[in-house]
Image: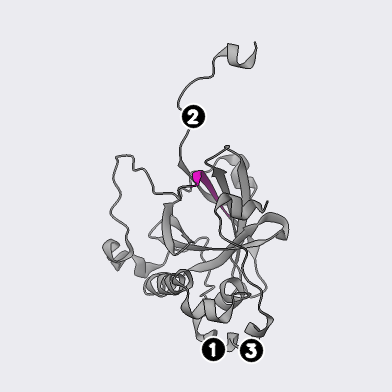
Amino acid sequence: MNILEDLGLEKSANINITNNNNNNNDTNNKITTTTLCHKSNARSKTTSSRSLGRESKSKEKVTLKLPQMWRGVKLDLFCNGKNKDGSDMMKLNVGVIRHDNGEIVPLQASLNSSWDSGVRRSVDTREWRESNHWIKMKMHKRELEYVYNIRASKIGLKQKKGGTEMVAFVYKHQDTWCVDIGRDGVIYNFELTDEVNEKQSTGNMIATAYAGARATRLIKPQELGI
C-alpha cells in the first residue's frame, strides 16, 4: 500500500517530461530568494491580517484546523548556511502523525528553488492549468507575494523517496515565521516560534511548531505490565 495515499497525502505528482517546454511561460513567477533567516519583510507591517486570513494574536489557545486524517503535525524550520547565490539555504521538516494509528510520516520541503523548479516541475500541464488544487496554489502564491518574500516547494518523503502534491509556503510576518500548507486545494496556516533550545539551535533550527492532539491521560503501570 502506498503510504502517501494511505495517509491521504495526495497521489504522487504526475511526471510529464514535456512540461519542460512549458516552464518558460512562468519565468516571471520565480520565488524571491532574498535573505530571510535574519530579516523580516518590512512591507508585512502594513498588511491587513484579514486579507491573508491571519487575525491578530490572542492569548487564548486556538485549535488549528488540520486535515481529517492527521492527528497532529510537527514543523521544524532550518537555515543551513548560504546557497551559491548568497541566499539562505532553508529546509522545512514536516512530521505528520496519522490519525488511525499514531505513526509519524517524515516529510520535508526544500525551499531553495524557483517556483518552476520547486513546485510546477513534474505536474501535468493540463492539471496545472485546470485542477482546483493547483489553481488555488497559484492564487495563494500571488496573494502572499503582495506583501511577503516567500519560499515555496512541494512536500515529499525524506531521502527523495517520493513527492506529493502538497505545497509548503514559508514567509515571515513581522517577527514570526509562518508556514502555509496547501493540500487538496485547502490552505492550512501555522505560526512557528523561534524559542528553540540549545540542541535545536546547534542543529540550525530557527523555528518550530506543533499542532494537533496531545496525550490526554496518564498511562497506568498495569497497562505496561509493570
**Where does label 2 land, which residue?**
215
212 to 1, vertically: above or below: above
Q: Secondary structure at mark 1?
A: helix
Q: Residue at x 71, y 58 (%)?
A: 161
Q: Residue at x 47, y 74 (%)?
A: 131
Q: Secondary structure at mark 3?
A: helix
Please say whether residue 192 is one of the residues in the magenta stretch: no
Which label is found at residue 21?
A: 3
Disc 1 from disc 2: Cα separation: 49 Å
Where's residue 203, x and y in %? Answer: 65, 48
Where's residue 220, x and y in %? Answer: 54, 14
Q: Is residue 57 left or right of residue 122?
A: left
Q: Residue at x 56, y 40 (%)?
A: 197
Q: Which residues are magenta?
A: 69-77
Amino acid type at mark 1: Asn
Q: Quadrant of residue 23?
A: bottom right
32 to 66, vertically: above or below: below
Given residues 133 and 28, the one toward you in this image is 133
Amino acid type at mark 3: Asn
Contact (Cβ within 8 Å) of mark 1 with mark 2 = no
**Where does label 1 land, which residue?**
25
Q: Secondary structure at mark 2?
A: loop
Which label is found at residue 91?
A: none
Q: Residue at x 54, y 86 (%)?
A: 27
Where's residue 3, x and y in %? Answer: 65, 51
